[in-house]
Amino acid sequence: MKFLDMLQRAERQNASKLCVGLDPEPTKFPDHIKGDANKIYDFCAAIVDATADLAVAFKPQIAYFSAHRAEGQLERLMEHMRRVAPQVPIILDAKRGDIGSTAEQYAIEAFERYGADAVTLSPFMGFDSVQPYLKHHDKGAFLLCRTSNPGGDDLQNQRLASVEGQPLLYEHVARLAQGPWNLNGQLGLVVGATYPKEIERVRALAPSLPLLIPGVGAQGGDAQATVRAGMSGPHGDVPGTTIVNSSRAILYASSGADFAQAARRVALQTRDVLNAAARS
């Protein structure tokens, strides 16, 4: 099944726009395993088990695993997610961006080693750094477009004098992803939840693309404003899926042995808020 079909099926089956981010930081683990990097798999697997029927996607952040020499635990986690939640696509948050021959190796890492359904990419080096991922026709790729970090303004919010209409850089990325770069209908965009107006602008430029929107929860993004902006089209709705990520607010909802149950409660609340916003 192609990634976009899998994503749309998960949205219907789990009635969800919530992506559960998996950013395991052992120093924030529950008290009984706090600081133990060998428990990364156990912690994340428990979160997956608790939220598998609530999520439209899972998004493991690769740096949180590789920093602790836990790539093997990530492989086990990917297998676990495919086994217990086969209906939920997995977006590997890697933000890769390199020349074509190196990109081919990164694509093998993401899609063959880890078995991800999609990956996040930096488009800064141009289309030839993205194209190797698109050769995996059943997979997806989310391009960084308008990120929620303060430094995003340094490049993303600058005007391109040499491009017709002098768009901002993030607007140009959105147009490329909606148009000439999206050869097989595999692309999506990453837009931070802290900029609802700019989410709305990206959605206007890329109405059919899935938007991956991090920043709801611990980063302060407004869930209702985020969903409304991601769904705002000329007739109040658009075909592209809106995927709203929450990581820390769910992962670290409790420091006790009930951490997985607490994570489920927060995930359920967040999913319901997102769904209510979509209906309003």
Image (spheres, rainbow, N blue to C red):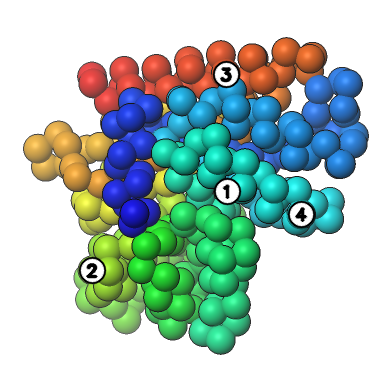
As measured in the structure, the alpha-carbon distance from the residue carrying label 1 to the one carrying label 2 is 26 Å
As measured in the structure, the alpha-carbon distance from the residue carrying label 1 to the one carrying label 4 is 30 Å
Residue 189, quarter of picture: bottom left
- Callout 4 secondary element: helix
Looking at marks 4 and 2 on the same chain, the residue that comes earlier in the sequence is marked by 4
| Amino acid tagged 1 | Asn
Residue that badge 4 annotates? 72
| Residue 80 horizontal side relative to residue 33, left or right | left
Residue that badge 2 annotates? 179
| Amino acid tagged 3 | Arg
Q: Nearer the viewer, residue 224 or 169?
A: 224
Of labels 4 and 2, the one closer to you: 4
Circle 1 residues within 10 Å: few <14, some 14–19, many ≥20: few
Looking at marks 4 and 3 on the same chain, the residue that comes earlier in the sequence is marked by 4
| Residue 224 horizontal side relative to residue 262, left or right | left
Of labels 1 and 4, the one closer to you: 4
- Callout 1 secondary element: loop
As measured in the structure, the alpha-carbon distance from the residue carrying label 4 to the one carrying label 2 is 38 Å
Circle 3 residues within 10 Å: few <14, some 14–19, many ≥20: many
62 to 248, vertically: above or below: below
Residue 14 percent across, percent down from the top left:
37, 27
